């Protein structure tokens, strides 16, 4: 696969800029030892648009010049103690502690002082942006936060590879999620923050779960429910995007463009009303869903990997998962779409030890670490080699997520999306009780979604 690479001078200058620490920390790789970028061969043709299975056209990190070892250079240039602050989620504390111990053991000639704090990937942005300079040197975050973090200068661009090729050894979608304007700003950690269909195979056959209408028919006959958090913008998106009605984030990274009120939108809205009016497809939040699955009332649900254990315990050998089904709107079947989601690790450019922070970020996201996360917590790897293992491929939830990936898009929306989408979902899932004209309802929704951010 072709890579778009930086010119040698530019890449070297950028690498020097990033590897020189800000503040009075340990010394970093000097300019003379910065890894040089690869220079394209003279006969290499101009870059083309990447195929669907190729990595995005992002600037490749600099590659060490032949005969040099960027890690050895970093070690040689380091004096004193390397002090680093790391943030990981509460659920990832034990595993990250072990990884940090392994990282220190890998470089016994360096003295480290690494502290680990707890910070959810879902709230990392808000905490970091409170005081970027005081934030962790290395931190995990959900990919939908990347635009604001980059805009605030809170993420160091990945301009050098130390131990592996960040772009080519991770899934294309994960690399795209870690990039802004063609430049990679984070290290893919997981590729499982999306949603798909869990189901009880004693109730539904593999054929049944291809169509939402068929699933409702089967569940009704069995006296069971199908759960989906329809009054949540993250999930209701699947209907409108599936029918080709788009929601996109503008180039300013703040405002939205939305076509949900375009021709065909009212068909989708009516389809949601019809599906939920059956009383079988139920608008239900995550915690209620977990309870209803455990109590045997829900036999299928749209959810993510975090509910895999709940479903597996409830349904035992009948636990199964697959991509989302089709739904019918205006007499035509559409494949339900979804948001794909990734968890990333970023490096704070204000770190006093940027070079070591980048090396640690690589360590926490390499093949071995992503495999360890899967084995310990069932989190789907973004690393291609880890994702191709027999154990990962045999996991029903991860396999379903992979199947849904062909119909998924990265979550990139401005803040004005969530409240109008939630209101729309509540109205449609309750059957539009006020009888509001659907076109008017969608126009109002889109007006709210696209309202300028002040």
Image (cartoon, helix red, strand yellow):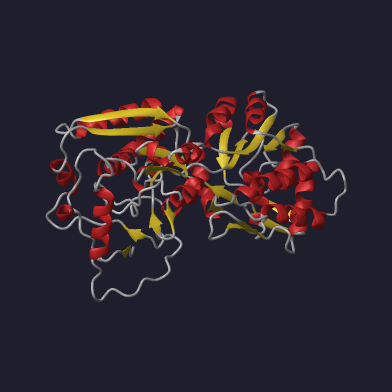
Q: Where residue 408 sits: x, y (%)?
A: 55, 52
On the question of residue 394 being in view, the answer is: no
On the question of residue 452 being in view, the answer is: yes
* Residue positioned most to the top: 295
- Residue appearing at x 49%, y 49% in the figure: 148
Q: Is residue 268 left or right of residue 303?
A: right
Nearest to the observer: residue 56 or residue 361: 361
- Residue appearing at x 20%, y 44% in the figure: 28
Q: Is residue 307 left or right of residue 99?
A: right
Q: Where residue 205 sits: x, y (%)?
A: 63, 41
Residue 226, quarter of the rendered image:
top right
Q: Is residue 99 above or below residue 335?
A: above
Residue 319, quarter of the rendered image:
top right
Q: Is residue 224 left or right of residue 290?
A: right
Residue 55, quarter of the rendered image:
bottom left
Q: Is residue 156 left or right of residue 149?
A: left
- Residue appearing at x 62%, y 53% in the figure: 453
Q: Quadrant of the N terminus?
A: bottom left
* Residue positioned most to the right: 435
Q: Where residue 411 sits: x, y (%)?
A: 55, 50
- Residue appearing at x 35%, y 54% in the figure: 167
Q: Where residue 40 sits: x, y (%)?
A: 25, 69
Nearest to the observer: residue 5 or residue 297: 5
Q: Is residue 430 above or below residue 161?
A: above
* Residue positioned most to the front: 24
Nearest to the observer: residue 153 or residue 331: 153
Labels in figure, total:
0
């Amino acid at each position: 696969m072709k890579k778009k690479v930086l010119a040698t001078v530019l890449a070297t200058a950028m690498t020097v800029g990033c590897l020189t620490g800000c503040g009075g920390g340990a010394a970093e790789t000097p300019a003379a030892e910065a890894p040089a970028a690869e220079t394209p061969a003279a006969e290499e043709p101009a870059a083309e648009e990447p195929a669907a299975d190729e990595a995005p056209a992002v600037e490749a990190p600099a590659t060490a010049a032949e005969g040099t070892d960027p890690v050895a250079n970093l070690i040689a240039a380091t004096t004193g103690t390397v002090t680093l602050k790391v943030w990981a989620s509460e659920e990832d504390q034990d595993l990250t502690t072990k990884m940090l111990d392994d990282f220190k053991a890998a470089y016994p000639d360096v003295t480290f002082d690494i502290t680990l704090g707890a910070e959810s990937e879902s709230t990392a942005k808000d905490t970091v942006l409170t005081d970027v300079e005081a934030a962790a040197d290395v931190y995990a975050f959900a990919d939908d936060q990347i635009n604001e973090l980059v805009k605030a200068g809170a993420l160091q661009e990945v301009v050098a590879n130390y131990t592996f090729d960040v772009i080519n050894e991770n899934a294309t979608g994960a690399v795209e999620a870690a990039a802004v304007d063609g430049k990679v700003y984070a290290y893919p950690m997981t590729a499982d923050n999306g949603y798909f269909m869990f189901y009880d195979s004693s109730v539904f056959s593999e054929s049944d779960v291809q169509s939402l209408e068929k699933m409702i028919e089967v569940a009704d006959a069995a006296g069971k429910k199908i759960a989906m958090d329809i009054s949540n913008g993250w999930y209701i998106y699947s209907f409108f995007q599936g029918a080709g009605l788009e929601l996109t984030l503008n180039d300013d990274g703040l405002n939205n463009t939305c076509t949900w009120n375009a021709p065909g939108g009212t068909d989708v809205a009516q389809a949601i009303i019809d599906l939920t009016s059956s009383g079988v497809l139920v608008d239900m939040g995550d915690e209620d869903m977990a309870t209803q699955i455990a109590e045997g009332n829900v036999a299928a649900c749209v959810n993510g990997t975090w509910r895999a254990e709940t479903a597996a315990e409830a349904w035992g050998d009948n636990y199964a998962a697959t991509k989302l089904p089709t739904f019918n709107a205006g007499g035509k079947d559409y494949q339900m779409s979804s948001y794909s989601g990734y968890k990333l690790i970023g490096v704070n450019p204000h770190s006093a030890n940027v070079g070591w922070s980048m090396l640690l970020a690589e360590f926490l996201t390499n093949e071995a670490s992503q495999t360890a996360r899967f084995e310990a917590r069932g989190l789907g790897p973004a690393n291609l080699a880890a994702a191709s293992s027999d154990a990962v491929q045999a996991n029903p939830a991860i396999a379903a997520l992979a199947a849904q990936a062909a119909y998924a898009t990265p979550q990139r929306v401005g803040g004005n999306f969530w409240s109008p989408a939630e209101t729309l979902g509540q109205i449609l899932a309750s059957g539009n009780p006020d009888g509001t004209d659907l076109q008017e309802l969608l126009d109002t929704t889109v007006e709210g979604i696209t309202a300028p951010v002040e």
